Image (spheres, rainbow, N blue to C red):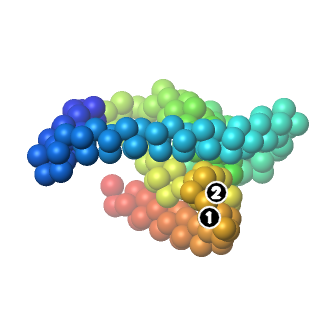
């Protein structure tokens, strides 16, 4: 479905630009956009490699497992009935807190798979699944590595100036998400 939406948007934009500014302008704009996309990907590659490397070192050193153990009790309270998925949930949350959404995705998919395996009603998400999805969507981050990398790639003089505001906004979003999930779980 998304491929259709993006295709329609691309086609409509190309047709509009061609008719309003000419074919040469449309082609030059597409080429300039592609060049900027490649440059951005290469710039972010270094930041991702750094943080993924640090996460790999932390995992090998046992720091992720230690963090997972520290988060286990709050996760069991937060995601009641998650059962064997608690380990994958804690790893997902730990990676997200470090701003490593791409590294967190496999843990999140594994957590959802494990929770679905123990779900009695396969057509309806459990409360734990809903809370997990809401917490992931609120994206609590201690270190917004992706945004710092994007700001650095864009030439920001202080790419890490967003850390405090990101922590406050993502923290409030997570609190509201948890509160609403608890409120709505009581109603069902």
Q: Is residue 80 among the parts visible in the rendering?
A: no
Q: Residue at the location (59% across, 72% down)?
A: 165
Mark 1 vs mark 2, CA separation in Å: 5 Å
Residue 119 image position (x, y, % from top left): 44, 33
Relative horizontal placement of residue 135, taking residue 51 as reference (left or right) = left
Residue 30 image position (x, y, % from top left): 33, 40
Of residue 141 and residue 33, the one placed in the foreground of this image is 33
Q: Secondary structure at mark 1?
A: loop
Relative horizontal placement of residue 6, taking residue 86 as reference (left or right) = left
Relative horizontal placement of residue 114, taking residue 122 as reference (left or right) = right
Residue holding disc 1: 156
Q: Residue at the location (68% across, 60% down)?
A: 142
Q: Residue furthest left?
A: 19
Say if 5 sits above or below 147 in the image. above
The quarter in which the C terminus is drawn is bottom left
Residue 14 image position (x, y, % from top left): 20, 41
- 10 Å crowding of disc 2: few (<14), some (14-19), many (20+): some
Of residue 126 and residue 102, the one placed in the foreground of this image is 102
Residue 152 - label = 2
Say if 158 sits above or below 38 in the image. below
Residue 3 image position (x, y, % from top left): 27, 32
Q: Residue furthest top?
A: 117
The quarter in which the N terminus is drawn is top left
Relative horizontal placement of residue 64, taking residue 179 as reference (left or right) = right
Give yes or no for contact between labels 1 and 2 (Cβ–Cβ under 8 Å).
Answer: yes
- 10 Å crowding of disc 1: few (<14), some (14-19), many (20+): few
Q: Is residue 14 among the parts visible in the rendering?
A: yes
Q: Residue at the location (79% across, 41% down)?
A: 54
Residue 55 - label = none
């Amino acid at each position: 479905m998304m491929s259709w939406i993006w295709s329609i948007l691309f086609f409509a934009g190309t047709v509009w630009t061609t008719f309003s500014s000419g074919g040469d302008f449309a082609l030059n704009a597409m080429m300039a956009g592609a060049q900027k996309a490649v440059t951005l990907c290469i710039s972010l590659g270094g930041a991702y490699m750094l943080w993924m490397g640090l996460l790999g070192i932390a995992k090998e050193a046992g720091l992720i497992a230690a963090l997972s153990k520290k988060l286990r009790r709050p996760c069991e309270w937060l995601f009641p009935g998650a059962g064997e998925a608690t380990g994958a949930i804690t790893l997902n949350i730990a990676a997200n807190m470090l701003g490593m959404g791409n590294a967190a995705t496999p843990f999140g998919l594994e957590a959802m798979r494990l929770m679905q395996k123990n779900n009695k009603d396969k057509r309806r998400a459990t409360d734990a699944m809903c809370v997990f999805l809401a917490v992931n969507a609120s994206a609590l981050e201690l270190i917004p590595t992706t945004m710092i990398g994007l700001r650095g790639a864009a030439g920001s003089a202080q790419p890490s100036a967003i850390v405090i505001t990101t922590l406050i906004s993502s923290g409030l979003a997570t609190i509201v998400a948890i509160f609403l999930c608890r409120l709505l779980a009581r109603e069902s």
